[in-house]
Image (tube, helix red, strand yellow):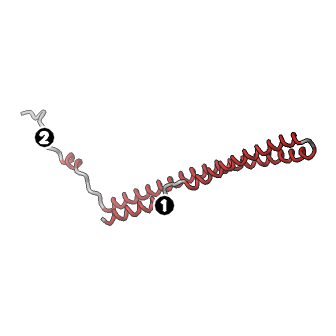
Amino acid sequence: MSTQGTPGPKSPSTVADKVAPKKTIGELVADVSQTFSALVRDEIKLAQAQLVQKFSRLGIGGAMLAVAGLLLALYAVPVLLYSAIHGLAHAVPLWLSALIIGLVLVLIAVIIALVGLSKIKASQKQDMPDPVGGLKESVGAMKKGLKK
């Protein structure tokens, strides 16, 4: 008789492959340790990303304040001084025109400074998730899971 085409009895290795082996306590502790380490690393990466974002916003606000100071120092002050000198030495129309130009530059510097300050304040008020709080929640959840 031929046994071709008829299924034979299952070998023990195929049955053992389908049953998942239970992990030992040592393996479970190692898994928890690895998971906890990964969690801590991810929380640190999140904190670093948040700091980079905050400092970039602070940098923009600081740069705008620097531009406002530059406008004030390089353009507004000399023009105002020039208008004062010409105002005393010459007729009023020349003085008045120089004064108007100086005041316009001061107004531009004030607007840039206010925008820069608002950007700095906005970066300080931004609600970011607390990485330390997230880590504490994760530790609490792990402790609760280990108690079960």
Q: Give the residue pinned by disc 2.
A: 8
Residue 99, located in which quarter of the rendered image?
Answer: top right
Q: Say whether residue 71 is left or right of residue 140.
A: right
Q: In the rendering, which numbered label is found on residue 146?
A: none
Question: Hey, which residue is sitting farthest bottom in the picture?
Answer: 147
| For residue 71, side relative to residue 82 (left or right) | left
Q: Earlier in the sequence, mark 1 or mark 2?
A: 2
Farthest front residue?
92
SS state under label 2: loop
* 49 and 18: which is toward the camera: 49
Residue 58: give x, y in percent of width and height.
Answer: 62, 52
Mark 2 is on which residue type? Gly
- x and y percentages locating residue 43 in the rendered image: 48, 56
The front one of 114 and 144 is 114
Q: Is residue 142 above or below residue 10?
A: below
Pick the residue in front: 64 or 10.
Answer: 64
Outermost residue to the right: 89
Q: Image point 33% across, 64% down: which residue? A: 146
* Three-letter residue code for mark 1: Val
Q: Distance from label 1 to label 2 (Cα)?
A: 60 Å
Residue at 47% x, 54% y: name it. Answer: 42
Left/right placement of residue 84 relative to residue 112 reads right
Direction from residue 83 to residue 135 in the image, left or right: left
Q: Report the disc number at residue 132.
A: 1
